[in-house]
Image (cartoon, rainbow, N blue to C red):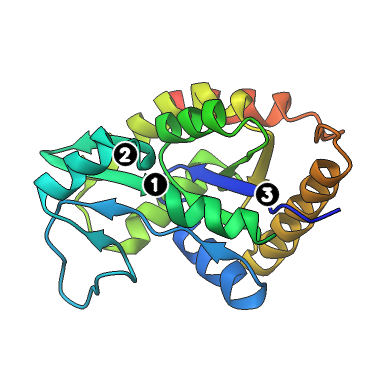
Amino acid sequence: MSKTGILTVVSGFSGAGKGTLMKAIVDKYAYALSISATTRSPREGEKNGREYYFLTVEEFESMIKNDALIEWAKYVDNYYGTPKAYVEKQLEEGKNVILEIEIQGALDVKKRFPDALLLFVTPPSAEELKKRLIHRGTEDMETITKRIKRASEESQYMNQYDYILVNDQIEDCVEQMNSIINEAADCLQKGEKFQTKENFEPLIDRMQNELKTI
């Protein structure tokens, strides 16, 4: 029986360390990292086909029309989306694909790929999230406050994910993430549904309460 890869969708709060986690796991393990398409202009140092596929509005809207995207959305006058062809090709070749997108996009992917594994990344506490946002040194306190408010809203969707990853020590989180993906991939091969035995409700409740009061 030929092996089909599993699609893993990663979401999480801004400041949870998703980008660092994604780079670390792709560097260490043989995952295919899906690259999003966007109509925004490249920033300094960015290259087409590495950070994003940089498209014109006409090119992007043509992809929408031709159903060539798994999911797409418009943020601040720019389109962002996930090209379907690359993801499907990698999965058919038996490779496990990781995709990092926002919550709404993740839930849209789950509708189109019911076997997709949804992972949510969170720091150990709301206080730690605030600390990481401040230490990034890229935003003022007003913006950080808005990000925490957004995180509070996003936390309402945590229970729709298959697994919650607490990103405390990056190396530990990479190993845990790799283990969960492999377990879910094995279930997919056997025709079984991945179900974790861990109860994340106490963690979700705590994060929701902390984010409201921080």
State yes or no: discs 2 and 3 in contact (Cβ < 8 Å).
Answer: no
Q: Please name the residue shown 74% across and 64% down the image.
A: 175
Q: Please name the residue shown 87% across and 33% down the image.
A: 197
**Residue 101 coordinates in the image, percent (x, y):** 43, 44
Q: Amino acid at mark 1?
A: Ser
Residue to which mark 1 is pinned: 14
Identify the secondary structure beneath mark 1.
Answer: loop
Residue to which mark 3 is pinned: 6
Q: Looking at the figure, which quarter contains the C terminus?
A: top left
State yes or no: discs 1 and 2 in contact (Cβ < 8 Å).
Answer: yes
Q: Neighbour class for label 1 at 10 Å: few (<14), some, many (≥20)?
A: many
Front position among marks 1 and 3: 3
Q: Which one is earlier in the sequence, the residue at label 1 or at label 2?
A: 1
**Residue 179 coordinates in the image, percent (x, y):** 79, 57
Front position among marks 2 and 3: 3
Residue to which mark 2 is pinned: 147
212 over 6 or under it: above or below: above
143 over 152 or under it: above or below: below
Q: Examine the image and state in which quarter residue 50 appears.
A: bottom left
Q: CA distance from mark 2 to mark 3?
A: 31 Å
Residue 70 vs residue 134: left or right? right
Judge by depth and name the residue closer to the eye, 81 or 17.
81
Residue 66 vs residue 111: left or right? left
Q: CA distance from mark 1 to mark 3?
A: 25 Å
State yes or no: discs 1 and 3 in contact (Cβ < 8 Å).
Answer: no
Q: Which one is earlier in the sequence, the residue at label 1 or at label 3?
A: 3
127 over 22 or under it: above or below: above
